[in-house]
Image (tube, rainbow, N blue to C red):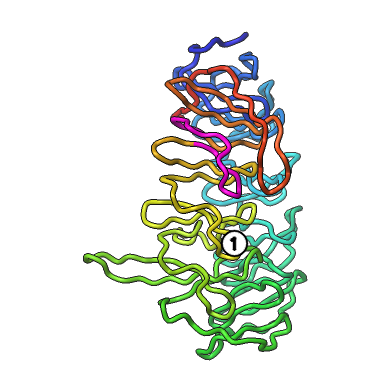
Amino acid sequence: TAMADGDWESGVGFNFGLATVVKDEKCGLIDTAGNIVLPLEYEYAYAISDGVVQVRVDGKYGLIDTAGNILLPLDYDSIYIYDDGLILIVKDGKCGLMDALWKIILPPEYDTFGYFSEGLAYVVKDGKYGYIDKSGNIIIRIEYDKALAFGDGLAVVVKDGDMGFIDKAGDVVIPLVYSFSTGFYNGKAVVKEKGDFKVISKTGEVVGTFIFPKEADSITSYDVNGQTELIHAKKTEEIDGKEVTKYGLVDQTGKIVLPIEYDEISWVNNTESWVNYVDGLATVKKGELYGAIDTAGNIVIPIEYDGVSSFSNGLLLVKKDEKWGYIDLDGNEILGGFDDASDFNDDGIAHYTQDGKHYLLEKVAIKKERSALGVFEPRPPIDSFYPTFP
């Protein structure tokens, strides 16, 4: 059975060849020809893999195939696409992992998981940190008070307030004697010991000096997976009776490479302990405008946009003068002038709105070089793709 335009109230863009549609607060799936693949009888339905659908019934989530066969029982609070083909499941406030074959490799008894870097990710249980591999094996015992992602072969770990480094075998290679530490980048890390900042090598030898920037109140080591040497500096002051915090970047000598005058640097002002560089870029906000920097702190996309989304498929979705469009990683405009738009999904499909009509936009060809120039094919108008799920 095919659904004509207007037969459903709202929906979500195509993923793995299927789109979610909603009618009378019930969700189902259609294919690109409009044929109903999954009946509209679920509280939530979304294709998360080829032939695999996440659904919700009576407030609980599970996985089914497009024939309705249950792959994972519907008794979970949440299910998320996690990292590198793994699925994160949540039950009674605890997290677990499934592999790409829908087999549970870690039961839902953990507090949270980090993202994989150099083949390992930290895992937290009862407030303590350790590391797992992509098969769900505990590789490094869960015993630390805090841990960051591996970078340059080593990871920062914390115990009883002291910081040091372990290797991927879990051996302590630099003693836990520091009150502050960044991760390693190009064989060097900035640490603080007995009140003094210094730069050390991967053997723990002092190889340089870090001069604390006088413009900053503090510096913070964020989890950047060894992508950059830059350290986040911040300064908080009272303006018109309200505390205002600004952020910038310094290098491994303490030299300011991005002035401490930004309101956001990617995730730096959130509660997350990592900074998201995608394709070597991170978004920044100054005042009410957005742009992007590279891992050296250079502004590569001008700070002139009213809004930004996330980098996807080599493009950044931006808003300027009340219109949305796509720019490449060098800031070149690829497409624009839309009233609303979405990021491209893993299938290379986005949706946009123009003059009250809704369209799917398919990226049918794209170069792999840094300038992500491509060929784009708008599809015929479709009904609304902006639902509010029950």
Tell me if residue 265 comes above or below residue 7 in the rendering: below
Tell me if residue 169 comes above or below residue 63 in the rendering: below
Name the quadrant containing residue 285.
bottom left
Quarter of the figure that contains the N terminus:
top right
Q: Nearer the viewer, residue 374 or 263?
A: 374
Residue 96 magenta:
no
Quarter of the figure that contains the C terminus:
top left
Q: Nearer the viewer, residue 189 or 339?
A: 339
Residue 255 lies left or right of residue 227; in this view the side is left
Give the residue at x 67% y 29%: 16
Pointer 1 residue: 125
Q: Which residues are magenta?
A: 325-341
**Number of marks:** 1
Q: Amino acid at mark 1?
A: Lys
Find numbered disc 1 in the image and state the secondary structure of the residue it sits on.
strand
Name the quadrant containing residue 29.
top right
* Secondary structure that dominates the magenta span: strand
Give the residue at x 42% y 76%: 216
Give the residue at x 61% y 34%: 62
Q: Residue furthest left?
A: 241
Q: Is residue 307 visible?
A: yes
Q: Is residue 26 visible?
A: no
Residue 42 lies left or right of residue 238; in this view the side is right
> Residue 291, position in %: x, y?
49, 52
Name the quadrant containing residue 259.
bottom left
Q: Nearer the viewer, residue 119 or 58?
A: 119
> Residue 288, position in %: x, y?
37, 52
Tell me if residue 248 comes above or below residue 106 in the rendering: below
Residue 332 magenta:
yes
Q: Nearer the viewer, residue 255 or 100?
A: 255
> Residue 273, position in %: x, y?
53, 63
Tell me if residue 381 comes above or below residue 287 in the rendering: above
